[in-house]
Amino acid sequence: MNKETLIIQINEREAVLAWLRSDAAFSDRPEIVRIPLEPGVIRQGVLVQEELLAEALRRYTSALPQTLTAVKTPAVFILNPLQGFCRTLILPWIPAQKREASVRYLLEDEYALEEEELWFTAVTLQESRADNVLHMMTGAARRAVLMPYVEVLNTLGWQVGKILFGAVLLAGLMELRDGQDTLVVDVDNALPFILLWRGTELMAARVFLPEELTGFAAWHCAGEVRRFLLYADRQYAGLNLHAIYAGGVRSAEVITDMDLPQEMEIRRIRSGAGWGSEDDEVAGDAGYFLAGGVKALSAAGVGKTPELDLMKRPLQRKKRQQLSLGLAVIWFGICLIGFAGHGWFTRYQANLQIASQTLQTQVAGVAARVKQEQAVQMQWQDTLDGEPSVISRLDQIEEIRQDAMLDYDEVVYREEEMTLKGKAASVQDARRLLASIQSLGWGVPTLTEYRQMNGEKIVFTIRVRSAKQ
């Protein structure tokens, strides 16, 4: 499916537009549509009432197929000579990397506007470092003049991707030759103007306000043309006027009233595609601007006319801003991931440190318990290996108990100290037990409890320590 592009030019009387397919040749003759505008919508090239322009265009778009009113349908806006300034600057040779800054400096100095308010573009036509000469086709306009048009078209779904100069596009409809000067006179237009071409370079332009040419008079307009030529002859030495193009019937009358030499060739602007009247003239206000745009943008015309595009630098700036924003978002995301990762790593490190400390505490506790058990085991082994052994002593005490008819209720041995709780049939049996314990190498026994009631057996408790203590 071929993509359609809208080409539109708007003046004080009407909006003139045409649709161009991406693969179309100029000979395909796309239909020109004219939409009348109410008086006062546009004044001296400035859009004053945006709503009225949008309403007029909306009435037209309501009958269009949806494919032509879809969001971001490409559009090319063509400026008339009053909406934008363009001409060829002849400068000393300047390195390519410094040309844009030099042109901006000249334009800002002439218009006294800040960079953001002044939209401009420039194309190098010819240069010679040896001759120290540089020719640059330059175009400029105020942002405040352009943006209302762009915003209205964008709201209708037509995405303005290029803003071109009608005066430059007009070159595609004329026979321009190197070394010859060509004049264009149009007093039939809503905004009359004069253009001077030297070869293929636009050298000068003069736009008349409506009040300057009130009450058309050929002799008056002819006088204005003569003054313009006098200025151009002084500004550009060696004026060699070869042909004059008339924008319409009244323009032809003005040229005839100038008493030009008979060899001077007077021509009418023709589209070369069968538009307009039967003799192939582009009739009506600014129709030839649109025809020039269609021819320049068609497959056969690309590259043959210098393209002064005022949207080029703003779109590049927008892309740079979007790229910077994208990089900033990516960098922010990386930083966010880094911060999150750092926070996670910090928490992980803290948890790992806590786990390590807990494990160290548990290992220390286990080691202490093992050491304690080893000490107990060693102590118990020492006890078992001692002379005389506790076991042999206990065996001896058990023999004494059996001989003395003693009953033991409890025998407790702890750290070289023994406690005996039991019963004896008589006092003599208890005394023999005390003597026997001492004879086994224990110390002097201590009788800590002695009790006998009503002829019962004697209940006693003896505590004795090893004689080594």
Image (cartoon, helix red, strand yellow):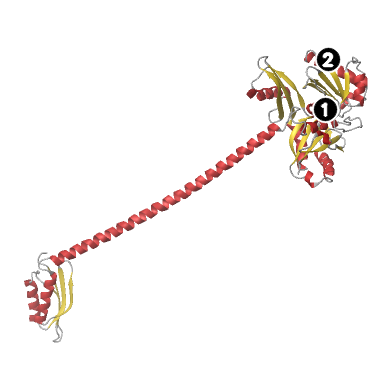
* Horizontal side of residue 281 vs 439, given as left or right: right
**From the viewer's perspective, is residue 224 above or below residue 44?**
above
How many numbered discs, if any?
A: 2
Which quadrant: the C terminus? bottom left
In the foreground, 417 or 331 = 331
Camera-near label (2 vs 1) is 1
Measured as percent of width and height from the top left, residue 104 is found at 68, 25
Residue 227's tag is: none
393 lies above or below 147:
below
Q: Is residue 424 above or below residue 116?
A: below
Which residue is situated farthest in the bottom direction here?
454
* Res 172 quadrant in image: top right
Q: Position of residue 427 (x, y in %)?
A: 9, 81
The residue pinned by badge 1 equals 173
Viewed as shown, does residue 387 lie left or right of 379? left
Mark 2 packing: few (<14 Cα in 10 Å), some, or many (20+)?
few
Q: Secondary structure at mark 2?
A: helix
Residue under pointer 2 = 230
Mark 1 lies on a secondary structure that is helix
In primary-sequence order, the first of circles 2 and 1 is: 1
> Of the residues shown, which amino acid type is indicated by label 2?
Leu
Residue 34 place in picture, x, y as percent: 86, 37
Q: CA distance from mark 2 to mark 1?
A: 26 Å
Q: Is residue 456 visible?
A: yes
Q: Is residue 288 left or right of residue 111?
A: right
Give residue 430's position: percent from left, percent from top: 10, 79
Asked if residue 47 can be seen in this view, the reply is no
Q: Amino acid at mark 1?
A: Leu
Question: Considering depth in this image, is 412 or 340 the residue closer to the camera?
Answer: 340
Among the 4 quarters of the image, the one containing residue 395: bottom left
Q: Quadrant of the N terminus?
A: top right
Residue drawn at x 71%, y 28% is: 120
